[in-house]
Amino acid sequence: MSPAGPDAFNHALHTANNWLADIASAFDTSDRRYTQRTLRAWLHALRDRLTVESAVKFGAQLPELLRGIYYDGWEPCKVPAKYGVDQYIQRFATQAGISPAQVPATASTITQVIGEHMAPGQLSQALAELPTHLRATVTGTAGIPRAATAGEPTRAAQDRIARIEDQVSNLTAAVRALAHGLEEGQITGAGIDQTHVARAARHADEILIAAGAQPTR
């Protein structure tokens, strides 16, 4: 039987059903549509918060049929979407058809089940790219009290750090775009082809403007 034959499809279907069954069991429900909606919301909310490279790397670890759900409607040119906890909760609730109050527990339950199906480190590597408070919501650790540590950043400081991390990420993407354009520039008798330079500068500006930063010019 060829890899693309019925046996391969049946195996893919069986694997996807196992994931869905385990998520349904974790929710103690037999409602298949609810399970699919919440998983879809979880996958899309994570996918769109990641860079293109990280999103593709994570998607490669999913079962084939769930990978189709994961990529459905994806627009690589619009990611990563820089939303925080409140936006994540509202987005998840709308797509899953649940109340915002249910999102943290629902998301963390799915996170736990998916983590059990993936090899160690695969899920945590993707989650590590999320801002601290959003990651805590997705993993279900946001409401866990703990003793304060001397020198530990306050919540306001952590928020500022998360914003700075996002700004650095945007600036890095803009610099890469500019550098790539310069590398493509051809050396002429008068120097570097300014058309490539101008195009690269515009691309860098677009990245910064989309992120709410000041343009390079």
Image: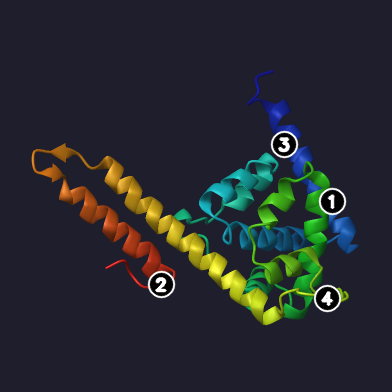
User: Label 2: few (<14), some or many (≥20) within 10 Å?
Assistant: some
The picture places residue 26, in percent across and down from the top left corner, at: 88, 59
The picture places residue 139, in percent across and down from the top left corner, at: 78, 63
Q: Earlier in the sequence, mark 2 or mark 1?
A: 1
Residue at image position (63%, 63%) is 45
The answer to whether 11 is drawn above or below residue 48 in the figure is above
Dot 2 lies on which element? loop
Q: Pointer 4: what residue?
A: 143
Identify which amino acid the numbered label 3 is placed on: Ala
User: Label 4: few (<14), some or many (≥20) within 10 Å?
Assistant: few
Residue at image position (73%, 50%) is 123
- Mark 1–mark 3 distance (CA, rounded to whole Å): 14 Å
Q: Disc 4 vs disc 3: which is toward the camera?
A: 4
Q: Pointer 1: what residue?
A: 21
* Residue 96 can be seen in this image: no
- Mark 2–mark 4 distance (CA, rounded to whole Å): 32 Å
The picture places residue 30, in percent across and down from the top left corner, at: 87, 59
Q: Disc 2 vs disc 4: which is toward the camera?
A: 2
